[in-house]
Every structure is written in C-alpha cells, then in structure tokens.
Image (tube, rainbow, N blue to C red):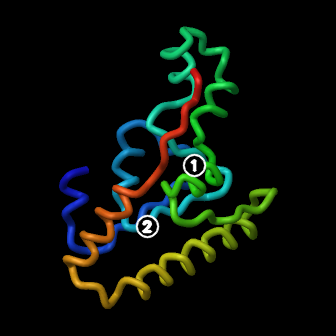
Amino acid sequence: MLELAKVKVPVIAIVIGEGSSGGALALGVGNKVLMLENAIYSILSPEGYASILWKDSSRVKEAAEKMKLTAQDLYNLHVIDKIIKEPKEINDESFDKVVKSLKKEIKSIILEMKDMTPEEIVQERYQKFRNMGEYINLDV
C-alpha cells in the first residue's frame, strides 16, 4: 500500500465482485475507485466479522448490514468514487454494456487527470485517502 500510494501516475481501481481482505485495503489507495453496483468491498467477509464479533457465523446478514459494504454505502462514505450500474440479468449483451460503461469511466478519469503533475496525482490520492469515511457508532 505504501508503495502504491507513492506512484506518480493515476491509479484506478475497480471492484467487480467481492473485494475483501488485504487486497481491499490496497484498492482503497487508488486515485479513483469504481465499483459495480452489486459488488461488495470490505477488509473482512461478513462471515468472518460475525465469527469474530459474536462468535456466531450464522449472524452473517446482520454483520453485512453493520459493515456497510455495498456500493451505495461506500459511495456515501466517500470510500468509492463511482457506482457502475449493472443489468438485472447477466448475459453476453448486458456484459458488453457493463464493459462499455467501465471503458467510458476509465477514459473520463484519464482525461480528467491527464494534465496533472506527478506531484498533484500523489497529493490528490493522499487527500482522498485522508478524507474517506466517517466515524459511526455501530453499538455492537
């Protein structure tokens, strides 16, 4: 994470399914983090959270709600920058639509950042990381 935070080019991370564990931490260092609307993103699985907190993995649904790991939750907490809509049914045609949406967003980010100096890119990433999230008492 430290090395990734120092790179002098834009870092764009995309959560497409289930981003968890140490890899999820590294994704958070990106200048921009995009997430498919039905993906989840957290440093721990809901099962692991329930097992650690309550010693009861059957409380997975409750754990998932408390963890705020949905795209909308994370967008509201400023952990991710953009939610990519997904179709209700997944097939070749709808998959192509998602890919086109991702391509459009990536191009937009590159154009937005193309005139930034390496130092500005690193500083923007640092500020984004420092400003994400907020403290919420979960009364666990």
Q: Which residue is mark 1?
A: 17
| Crowd rating for badge 2 (residues with CA inside 10 Å; few <14, some 14–19, many 20+) | many
Q: Amino acid at mark 1?
A: Gly
Q: Disc 1 or 2, which lies upstream in sequence?
A: 1
The Cα atoms of the two marked residues, 1 and 2, are separated by: 17 Å
Q: How crowded is the residue under tag 1: few (<14 C-alpha within 10 Å), some, or many (20+)?
A: few
In this view, the residue in front, 124 or 135, is 135
Task: Please state the horizontal and vertical placement of residue 117, each as a whole percent of the image.
Answer: 23, 84
Q: Which residue in the rendered view is the most extreme toward the right?
A: 88
State which quarter of the image contains the C terminus: top right
Residue at 45 percent across and 79 percent down: it is: 109
Give the secondary structure at mark 1: loop
> Count the marks: how many?
2
Which quadrant would residue 96 be assigned to in this image?
bottom right
Vertically, is 106 above or below 18? below
Instruction: Please say if 69 is above or below 112.
Output: above
* Residue 10, placed above or below residue 127: below
- Residues 127 and 102: in front is 127
Q: Is residue 113 left or right of residue 121?
A: right
Residue under the image location 19 percent in, 63 percent down: 6
What secondary structure is marked by label 2? strand
Specify whether 44 is left or right of 35: left
Q: Pointer 1 and pointer 2: residues touching (CB < 8 Å)?
A: no
Image depth: mark 1 or mark 2 in front: 2
Q: Which mark is residue 32?
A: 2
Residue drawn at (19%, 77%) of the image: 119
* In the image: residue 34, left or right of residue 21: right
Q: Amino acid at mark 2?
A: Lys
Name the residue furthest top: 55
Residue 84, horizontal then vertical, whole percent = 63, 65
Task: Give the x, y percent position of residue 78.
Answer: 51, 57
